[in-house]
Image (tube, rainbow, N blue to C red):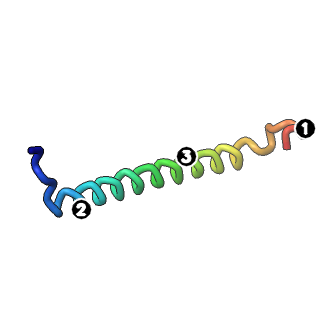
Amino acid sequence: MPPQPSPTDASHKHHRHAVYASEATGLLLIAALLLVLTLIRYWHNLHWSLR
């Protein structure tokens, strides 16, 4: 008979999911910030056809 998961296992999995979700959100925010800063810095160098 396989061991029954304890109720605390579910909370650990939920906590781990929350940590991964917040890490992914942080990485997306950093990537968006870098993209915006790059566009601001090089806006005058962009060709008019690309704007």
Residue 9: % across, % down: 19, 56
Circles 1 and 3 in contact, beta carbons < 8 Å: no
Q: Secondary structure at mark 1?
A: helix
Q: Residue furthest front?
A: 1
Q: Nearer the viewer, residue 2 or 9?
A: 2
Above or below, 35 against 5 in this view is above
Q: Which residue has dot 3 on it?
A: 31
Left or right: residue 18 compared with residue 32: left
**Label 2, label 3: how many angstroms apart (C-alpha)?**
30 Å
Quadrant assignment for the C terminus: top right
Q: Could you tell me which residue is drawn at 29 percent across and 53 percent down?
A: 16
Q: Earlier in the sequence, mark 1 or mark 3?
A: 3
Amino acid on which disc 2 is placed = Ser
Q: Which residue has dot 2 on it?
A: 11
Residues packed near mark 1 inside 10 Å, few (<14), some (14 to 19) or many (20 plus): few
Q: Earlier in the sequence, mark 1 or mark 2?
A: 2
